[in-house]
Amino acid sequence: MTAIQDKSDIIRTERGLTINGTRITLYDLMDYIHAGYPVKLIRNYFFYITEQQFNAAIAYIENNREQVESEYQQVLQESDINRHYWQEINKERFAKVANRNPKPENKKAWEKLQVWKTRLAAEA
């Protein structure tokens, strides 16, 4: 890990801008900020970090908004690419699983599940 500033509360790791001593990235906070959550509510979600760590993260975001925003958008794009990749990889596997017949010992449970699925589909 390399520090952005000596003894900084915010460091750059392989995961990006991170609150020192945690695995929480500033992009985790940005998810809530972009969703329009008030800072007090965001603080409640991150109750396991100190007030100093939280305040340092919020201050860093405010003081370096353009840089953090740019990196956040890149993280979102990479996440979207990864999600699409794994959806494609697993699409065939999920189709095979959905079409498998149940084992004989699970047949009654499977039939109950099908009844519930039919009910839920009818209610929707």
Image: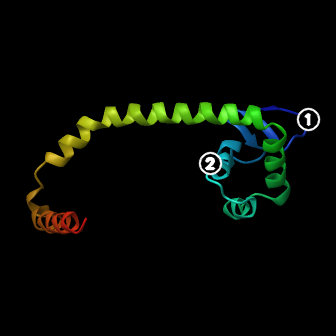
In the image, 92 versus 118, the foreground residue is: 118
Number of labelled discs? 2
Q: Mark 2 points at which residue?
A: 31
Q: Is residue 14 visible?
A: no
Specify whether 119 is left or right of 43.
left
Write down the quadrant of residue 115 in the picture.
bottom left
Q: What residue type is labelled 2?
A: Asp
Q: Is mark 1 on a helix, strand or loop?
A: loop
Q: What element carries label 2?
A: helix
- Residue 112: give x, y in percent of width and height: 15, 69
Q: Quadrant of the C terminus?
A: bottom left
User: Looking at the image, which residue is at 40% across and 31% down?
Assistant: 85
- Residue 108: give x, y in percent of width and height: 11, 68
Q: What residue type is labelled 1?
A: Asp
- 22, above or below 85, in the image: below
Please tell me which of labels 1 and 2 falls first in the chain: 1
Hey, which residue is sitting farthest right in the picture?
6
Q: Residues within 10 Å of mark 1 (few under 14, many from 20)?
A: few
Q: Can residue 91 be seen in this view?
A: yes
- 66, above or below 9, in the image: above
User: Looking at the image, which residue is at 68% across and 51% down?
Assistant: 33
- Residue 101: give x, y in percent of width and height: 10, 51
User: Mark 1 and mark 2: span between their CA atoms?
Assistant: 27 Å
Q: Name the residue under label 1.
A: 6
Q: In which quarter of the image is the N terminus?
A: top right
User: Looking at the image, which residue is at 72% across and 63% down?
Assistant: 47
